[in-house]
Structures are given as C-alpha cells and as structure tokens.
Amino acid sequence: MDSHSTPKTPVTLLGLGDMGTALARAWLAAGHPLTVWNRTPEKARPLVGEGARAAATPSEAVASAAGPVVVCLLDDASVGETLSGTELHGRDVVNLTTNTPDQAERRARWARERGARFLDGGIMAIPPMIGRPDTGGYVFYSGDHELFERHREALTVPAGVKFVGEEPGHAALYDVALLSAMTGMFAGITHAFALMGPEKDIDRARFATLLTEWLGGMAGAAHGIAAQLESGDYTEGVGSNLAMMAAANETLLATAQGRSVDPRLLTPFMELMRHRVDQGHGDEGLAGTIGLLRAE
Ligand code: FVH
C-alpha cells in the first residue's frame, strides 16, 4: 500500500487446494493482507514466501480475522470439521466450498447459531481463471446481503460476483443448475463425436467449430422456455414444436443405430419428449417436459 491508497481488507482463507491457492494468489497480487491455513501445512509455504501469513490452526486463523473468513475446502463435511473448534462469534464467514443447496442452508443456520454472519458462494470458474477478469469467471453469492456489500471489493478480486438472493442455498442452486446444464451439453458433444466416428476424412477441428457455433445459437432457446414458464402458455413463440422434435428423434436414433453408436446419452430426454407428445401436447415447446421431471 502506498501513502495515498486506501487500506485493503484483510482476508483469512481456510483451504489451499488448487482453488484456494489460486484465490490466495489473487488476493496477494491485489495487495490484500492475507492469513492462510491448510490441513497440510506445506501448501502454505510458497504463499508465505509471497507475503501471506500462515496460521497454525483454523482457530488461530479465525481468531485473528479482521475481515472475511473465506472457506474453500473439499466438501461440506470438511468445512464442518475445520470450523467446529473455532470461535465464530462476530465473524464474517464466506463459504466457497461446493455444496448442495440444502447443505448451504444448514451451514448458514449452523454459522448463525454460533454468532457468525454467513455468505455462501458457488464458483463458476476453474483455478487458471481466478484473478483473470478477461476469462469471464465469476462467483454466485447468496445469504447475508449486507455482508456481501461490506466485502464486495475483496470478493471481486478473484473473479466477478453475482448476488442471487438472501436464501443461503441459492448460490449452490444456481451453481448446480448451470453445471447440470453443462453436463447435458457434454453428453450431446460426446454423442456427436461418437457419431462422426473414427473416419480419417473427417476434420475434427472443423467439426468442433461447427458444434460450438450450433450449440451457442441453440442455447438461446433458454429465453423462450423461461418466457413460456412465466406465462404458463407452453405454445407461446414456439419455433420447433415437440411433435416435430419427437419425429426427428427417430432419425437421430436410426442414424446412431446405423453407425453402431449407443444412444444412451440421448434416450432419456427423447422418452420425455415422446411422453409429453403422447399426453396431447405436441404443439408445445420444451417447457412442458420440465413438469414431467418434478415430483410435485
Ligand atoms: N478446482 C476446480 O476446478 C473447481 C472449480 C469450481 C469450484 N471447485 C470447488 O472448490 C472447492 C475447493 O476445490 P480445490 O480445487 O481447491 O480442491 P482440492 O485441490 O482437492 O483441495 C481440497 C482442499 O480441501 C482440504 N481438505 C480436504 N478434506 C479436508 C478435511 N477433512 N479437513 C480439512 N481440510 C480438508 C484439502 O486439504 P489438504 O488435502 O491440502 O490437507 C485442500 O485444501 C471444492 O469444493 C470444489 O468442488 C473447484
């Protein structure tokens, strides 16, 4: 800090795995005083060389915290194990450990019962994207909004921030929803490459470009589905209706069979579409299939 700059918020960070280490380096590079703790203490050594202070125990780290206590560990169980012996009263806990919405809600209650303020975060980035705003990585936050605003400047250092509500589980919900959508997309990409087969005359790099462009364009359908869910009219603005898609699916399946490709990555969704058509909703878009997935 030079004599003209405002002092940077001190950050305490528990967990120095791949993600924790990337977070640590981003805060150090931005000039934030940083205290770190990790179960395997050796991982703290290089960071101490770069200006961090290493705490010997989680209790020591939390007790000396003068800003957010950021937790980035393997899973919710390791968070419980690490924080259970610490004095959390009056502390600002920011949990960046991937968890389920239910775990986040429970962990928020658990922290509040111990007198702490609590924010949960879902990281939409991989370690090389941390501290690199140009990569578009960000973190969903939910929980105590006042706490989020208080530490917004420090939280914005490793990646962009998106606050998604006061329900502590919402960050995890958004995180998992996006990752689930990504999983479906990867399934589609996997099937597409399997269809293209091992043929020597296929330019896979060119095919990858075509796939990327196509999926990018088709992803916009999410806006139409959102509008249909809002209005309750699942035929609103339909470009390709379910009856047409279900018929086209037969071509997709026949092609897979003809090329000896197992269609298992596609068939569950195709069955859902067929079911909705059979219920008499062939004129709808995809929104009507969503209700078939929810047990309510
Ligand atoms: N790395 C990634 O690409 C993803 C991107 C999206 C978000 N995730 C989540 O971030 C959390 C941390 O991930 P990570 O990459 O740092 O994970 P690891 O490198 O495996 O490090 C795990 C750290 O957790 C510590 N740890 C594990 N179990 C315990 C325990 N029982 N008590 C205390 N600490 C524990 C481990 O310590 P050590 O093995 O070094 O002693 C590491 O510090 C995670 O939720 C991702 O899903 C990352």
Image (tube, helix red, strand yellow):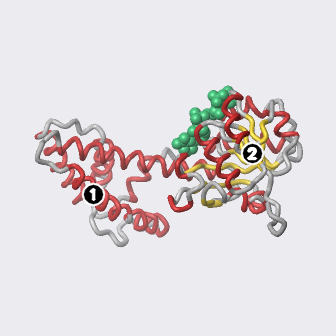
Q: Nearer the viewer, residue 226 or 100?
A: 100
Indicate which label's residue lies in the foreground, 2 or 1.
2
Question: Residue 227 bears which disc, if any?
Answer: none
Disc 1 is placed on an element classified as helix
Is residue 75 among what the camera can see?
no
**In the image, what residue type sits under mark 1?**
Thr
Q: Secondary structure at mark 2?
A: loop
Q: Amino acid at mark 2?
A: Gly
Find the residue positioned furthest to the bottom: 237
Q: Which residue is mark 2?
A: 51
The quarter of the picture showing ligand 1: top right
N-term-proximal mark, 2 vs 1: 2
Is 186 placed left or right of 135 in the picture? left
Does residue 275 appear left or right of residue 75 in this picture? left
Mark 1 Cα shell of 10 Å, populated few (<14), some (14-19), many (≥20): few
Q: Is residue 21 left or right of residue 210?
A: right
**Viewer-side residue, 97 vs 63:** 63
What residue appears at the point 56 percent right and 57 percent down from the top-left corner? Answer: 132
Tell me residue 141's x, y (percent): 65, 55
Q: Residues within 10 Å of mark 2 (few under 14, many from 20)?
A: some
Q: Is residue 278 above or below residue 78?
A: below
Which residue bears the numbered disc 1?
209
